[in-house]
Amino acid sequence: MAEKIANHNWTADAAVAEMLERAQALGLPTAFSRAQAMKPCPIGEDGRCCKNCNMGPCRLVKPGQTGVCGATLETITARNLARAIAAGAAAHGDHGLDLAFTLLAVARGEAPGYEVRDPYKLVNVAAALGIQPDSKSIQALALEVAEKALANFGQMRGDLSYVTRAPKKRQEVWRRAGVTPRGVTVEIMETLHRTHMGTDQDPESILRQALRTALSDGWGGSMLATDLSDILFGTPSPTVAKVNLGVLKDDAVNIVIHGHEPTLSEIVVAMSSDPELIAYARSKGASGINLAGICCTSNEVLMRQGVPSAGNFLNQELAILTGAVEVMLVDIQCIMQALAPLAQRFHTKLITTSPKAHIQGATHIEFDEHRAPDIARQIIRLAIDNFPNRNGSAIPTALADAVPGFSHEYINYMQGGAYRGSFRPLNDAVIAGRIRGAVGIVGCNNPRVTQDQTHLDLAREFLKNDVLVVQTGCGALASAKAGLMLGEAAFEYAGPGLREVCEAIGVPPVLHLGSCVDNTRILTVLTQMATEGGLGEDIADLPVVGFAPEWMSEKALSIGTYFVASGVYTIFGVSSPVGGSEEVSRLISEGWEKLVGGKLEFITDPEQMLQKALAHIDAKRAALKLAPYDPSRWGASGDWRMRELEGLPLAERLTELYGLPPAGA
Ligand code: SF4
Ligand code: MSK
């Protein structure tokens, strides 16, 4: 059965294929089937439609045509891109802002159930924000950090505090280009103003402001969200967890947490082990309470608490389709409205919790950090009460193990321990050519392309080419589902040099760095690589490439653009939102490369993505005067080699390993 759907090329995930067959059998639509029925508008798809005023909408379909106001194709496509980036930056910024308010409430003793779980991170973040930790108490320091973070969101002049975390050379590039972000809100506001009818009409100027807005996300809203989450919930370190729809349990109360914020989900995780609630679940005939995540809420609790993940963006409807979910608890972002009518076909209760995200047909239980434990308990009890209403279930068996949780701090630690932690070994491995370079493969799923397929194809090909892969968001969950986030994956997929490094440090060849906002962990890792020595002085010098091969959200565009503005060649798949204008496509690639060192390209062919990325990595290696990549130099040692020799008699093994003459020779 599953094969039929697999033949449609809808997904690379066997569990998803199984559930899509079930959806078909039950006559229920999903994003996959709706995407087949709804072809993208060819005018809007490549950015040629403007609806910024009521003289339009203007659709530019003929050469030389302009909008009613005279706006050109170039202006319209640039404005559309800038607006999408501003929306993405706003989503991340607002997420970070709420975390700042939570930290403020914790510091004032007004948020029962929360505490500063990582005081070391608090001290480091304070220093990065320009606050002297001195001998202040944790509470006092948390208060100052929260207030300074809030000030960064609202600041209208000057520079964002975190600009100084970038390499010095990068800060200079930004200053010269006039894109140093001032605050989070002001950049988003200015972009919306500039793109209003009749304001900024020079595509180059609009796109420069788009860079600045994206930087206010990467080195502002998102970076603050990551840091504040680590302070409140702990900085991640590797843990073992199960991933895919098979994490749902037939005999337990299943609660699926979906969205992006860790604030409520962390308390739900804590409350789910409350003996009283477990006893209550048993009184209803369940074996216990089973939590599972979807999307980036999943990434947050997966990497910090090891909570199993039911999968990525396109798995959300399919979790409900199992019939085994008592409650799907959602907060913000990437939550399909289709969940509400779908949940009504089963016994599942869809619960919205954010005052900013209501869905008709869902039950709304508003979250308030001042009484979080009570709210979490109420939701868990509601799920337990719903367990007896379950009417059969069909949970796929597909399940994988993964080792997520590679924060910047842990990557530093794993290369030398608590006292000698540094990026030296990683830089040395790149310099020597054991590691050819690194790629970040991040971002969403999109039913316009086969779910997970490009993420996985790229990851496996890069590993084969000794390129280290780091991942976040739904891309990370794609690799986790496919077993790439295990140490064993280095044996199966990595080239000889990368394999040796993974063996020596004891890490998977694909590192899970967290959720969407945690792409900023990649920025700080790149900064440390650039400043450690031997690989230039700027992020733009590094042999690295960024990818969002299955992107769909405006947040992804903001992320991609802040990587470009930070100096990274970034490749997106699916289709180009500026494809209607050759000039704008050129401005965001060659134009931005001249301005800030990174470029943004939209490429649909995975093979071309791979080849262009490898060529870029090799060109950066050559510019740094590093040894050309030569895999034949590596692989003669390590566990892999020992495994290869395992079957040989001892004498032959010694000959192979140490060149000793064969016995009797
Ligand atoms: Fe048309 Fe210009 Fe109005 Fe856009 S701003 S809808 S191009 S008239
Ligand atoms: S959840 S933005 S689908 S990565 Fe962060 Fe996944 Fe993209 Fe949402």
Image (cartoon, rainbow, N blue to C red):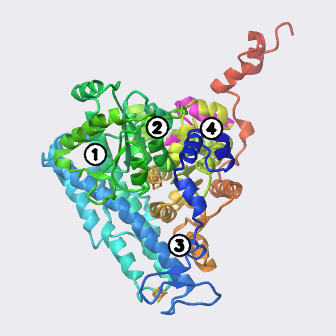
The answer to which quarter of the image holds residue 291 is top left
Asked whether 184 falls inside the magenta stretch, the response is no
Q: Is residue 143 above or below residue 415?
A: below
**Residue 310, horizontal then vertical, whole percent:** 46, 40
Residue identified by numbered label 2 = 404
- Disc 2 crowd rating (10 Å Cα; few below 14, some 14-19, many 20+) is many
Q: In the rendered image, which quarter contains the C terminus?
A: top right
Q: CA distance from mark 4 to mark 1?
A: 39 Å
The answer to which quarter of the image holds residue 542 is bottom right
For the point 70% across and 58% down, the residue is: 608
Going from N to C along the chain, the mark reached first, 3 or 2, is 2
Of circles 3 and 1, which is in front?
Answer: 1
- Disc 3 crowd rating (10 Å Cα; few below 14, some 14-19, many 20+) is many
Q: CA distance from mark 1 to mark 2?
A: 21 Å
Going from N to C along the chain, the mark reached first, 2 or 4, is 2
Q: Secondary structure at mark 1?
A: helix
Q: Amino acid at mark 1?
A: Leu
Q: Amino acid at mark 3?
A: Leu
Range of residues picked out in magenta = 496-513
Of circles 2 and 4, which is in front?
Answer: 2
Q: Are marks 3 and 1 in contact (CB under 8 Å)?
A: no
Going from N to C along the chain, the mark reached first, 3 or 1, is 1
| Mark number displayed over residue 264 | 1
Q: Are marks 4 and 1 in contact (CB under 8 Å)?
A: no
Compare residues 50 and 557 and report the one nearer the observer: 50
- Disc 1 crowd rating (10 Å Cα; few below 14, some 14-19, many 20+) is many
Residue identified by numbered label 3 = 595
Going from N to C along the chain, the mark reached first, 4 or 3, is 4
Q: Amino acid at mark 4?
A: Leu
